Image (cartoon, rainbow, N blue to C red):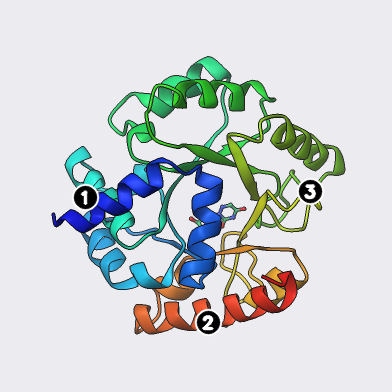
Amino acid sequence: PSSKPEIVETKHLSMSIRERFQMILKEKKTNLCLSADLPSLDEIIELSKQIGPNICMLKIHCDILNDFSMEKILQLKEISRKFNFLLLEDRKFADIGNTVKSQYTKGLFQISQWADLVTVHILPGEGIVEALEQAAQSINEPRGCLLIAQMSSKGALTDNEDYVKGAVQCAKKYSNFVIGFISQSRLTTDNQFLHCTPGIHLNNTGDQLGQQYVTPRQAIDGRGADILIVGRAILDSINRVKTAEEYQEEGYRVYEQLRHV
Ligand code: UP6
């Protein structure tokens, strides 16, 4: 590796994840998160080199990969530093504090070693966030999480006022570690929390398994999204880079208009 990524990395180490996210949004003019739901980490690595300039974040599911290795994931981490995007492991933690602590730091994936951010269900109560924050303190790099307050899928049981209120309360209490939400609506006027919204597609309204899509404009305008999480709309397109550019341009234009950045 050249010395350039090292310089970038040092700069990032002194910033919180929240500060880094805001800086990336403004500097790169993108609020696009690619959901790289592909079976091969090699393919994700190649794609991330091409799409790196267009995204603010890359989201993966490490447990769907057929070629996971720490060596490869650290390579992806290096690419994320070079192209200046965040790495989100969409682990959707959902267990008691003591268990998630191990799931976060141990096992084959050692998620805490490489993921800037992870997704967390609030279902078990705030102990889950407390445990992850505690575990993250053993890593000497900034770490954070996104609380799953609402889901995009049909019939989601998160569609409940008390549930969402609980998520917002928890985010405020642990605001050093919780930098935002996975959401389908604007949950708080406190703009330090980023609203990240999956279920985005310009051409489809859903899939056969309950996924529901809205357009980038509908997500940002109607649903209060700051960050657009886009998977198959890009992955299944004929030219992934060109499609990513389209979602970046459309997404950031609407975001600038509506959030006055
Ligand atoms: N995701 C959702 N909805 C949620 C939370 N997470 O779709 O409420 C995740 C999925 C997938 C991605 O696990 O990785 O976002 C959406 O992919 P798609 O754009 O291909 O539908």
Which numbered mark, 2 or 3, is in the foreground of this view? Answer: 2
Closer-to-camera residue (145/64): 145
Label 3 CB less than 8 angstroms from ligand 1: no
Report which residue position mark 2 lands on: 249
Q: Check disc 2 and give the amino acid type.
A: Glu
Q: Is residue 191 visible?
A: yes
The answer to whether residue 12 is above or below residue 138 is: below
Q: Quadrant of ligand 1?
A: bottom right
Does the image show residue 76? no
Earlier-in-chain disc, 1 versus 2: 1
The residue labelled by disc 3 is 159
Left or right: where 114 falls relative to 31: left
Please tell me whether mark 3 sits on a helix, a strand or a loop. Answer: loop
The answer to whether the residue bearing label 1 lies less than 8 angstroms from the nearest atom of ligand 1 is: no
The structure residue drawn at horizontal position 42% and vertical position 20%, both measured from the top left corner, is: 102
Q: Quadrant of the C terminus?
A: bottom right
On the image, numbered disc 1 is attached to which residue? 75
> Residues under labels 1 and 2: Cα distance?
28 Å
Q: Position of residue 33 (x, y in %)?
A: 49, 63
